[in-house]
Image (cartoon, rainbow, N blue to C red):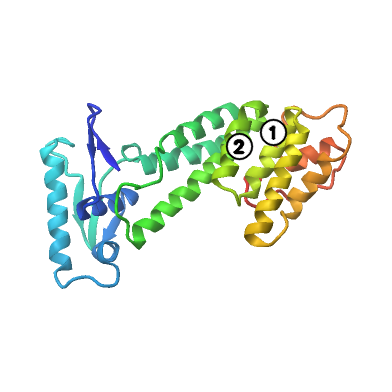
Amino acid sequence: MEIITDSRTSIPLGTSKISQVLALLVARAGEVVSVDTLVEELWGDRPPKSALTTLQTYVYHARRMFAQNRLTDSDRNVLLTRPPGYLLDASVDETDATRFQRLLRQGSESLHAERWEEASEQLRDALALFRGSAFASVSMGTVLAAHAANLEELRTRAIELRIEAQARLGRHREMVPELQSLVIARPLNEWFYGQLMVALHRCGRRAEALEVYQRLRRVVRDELGVEPSAEVQRLHRVMLEPVPQRAPETAASFRELRIAYGLEDRLVELGAGPG
């Protein structure tokens, strides 16, 4: 976690309690975070008797840091006292978390409007804001950890939507390296395996696509003691069928690939993906 000034000067924040307070206020920028929530984040269910006074001291030092580093104009107070707690008065594009969520929302809207290129660019810009795990350099209590987990889920969603946009644009070959990395990083996410199978197949690499299925099957059997989902199994069976003479170059989903093979059963898409 860091603060970047208008002149692009970076002010890193360490693992201090002050940074922890600021991180939670950043995660909920524009909202009042109650004193009780901040105390819970800092000390869990065992706050010291001096918790309120200590928290006020942390806020004082945070404000002083803003002033000393001239992070805002002299007439602007960013860290406000608002009953029953404090509020970080920042616009949507002043924090990475809120800017990411704006771009994710816009990318999703563009995708549903079938503006594939626009959606791909918006989602790429959203994902570029991540330089690692959210709040990785800050000590986290239960409240901040929940916000970090939510951001990670939204990050996965953004990846899924961007992959769908790329597939709609017919960029299957370009998708393969990223999907290979994703199935390694998220070995139990069957949707990514399915998309990798489709991308490899669209590149004429059917044998490798079938091997991806076998890899997934080994993983879920060893880790969970189950077979791959019914949808991925159906996709595997479809790929074992003779290749059709013509298949849509931009087949982006399992259903479209099945239709290309003449299996127009309209089965439900994998639940983990964009659908």
Instruction: Quickly name the residue at label 1.
Output: 199
Circle 2 packing at 10 Å, graded few (<14), some (14-19), many (20+), is many
Instruction: Quickly name the residue at label 2.
Output: 179
Q: Is residue 37 visible?
A: yes
Task: Please tell me which of labels 2 and 1 falls first in the chain.
Answer: 2
* Left or right, residue 140 beside residue 180: left
Figure quadrant of residue 69: top left
Total numbered circles: 2
Q: CA distance from mark 2 to mark 1?
A: 9 Å
- Residue 52 picture location, percent across and down: 16, 66
- Front residue of 205/233: it is 205
Q: Is residue 267 visible?
A: no
Decide: is 49 above or below 169. Answer: below
Q: Which mark is residue 259?
A: none
- Residue 30 picture location, percent across and down: 31, 49
Pointer 2 with pointer 1, Cβ within 8 A = yes
Q: Residue at x 45, y 53 (%)?
A: 150
Circle 1 packing at 10 Å, graded few (<14), some (14-19), many (20+), is many
- Residue 239 picture location, percent across and down: 81, 39
* Left or right, residue 172 beside residue 99: right
Identity of the amino acid at label 1?
Answer: Ala
Q: Residue at x 35, y 47 (%)?
A: 136
Circle 1 SS class: helix
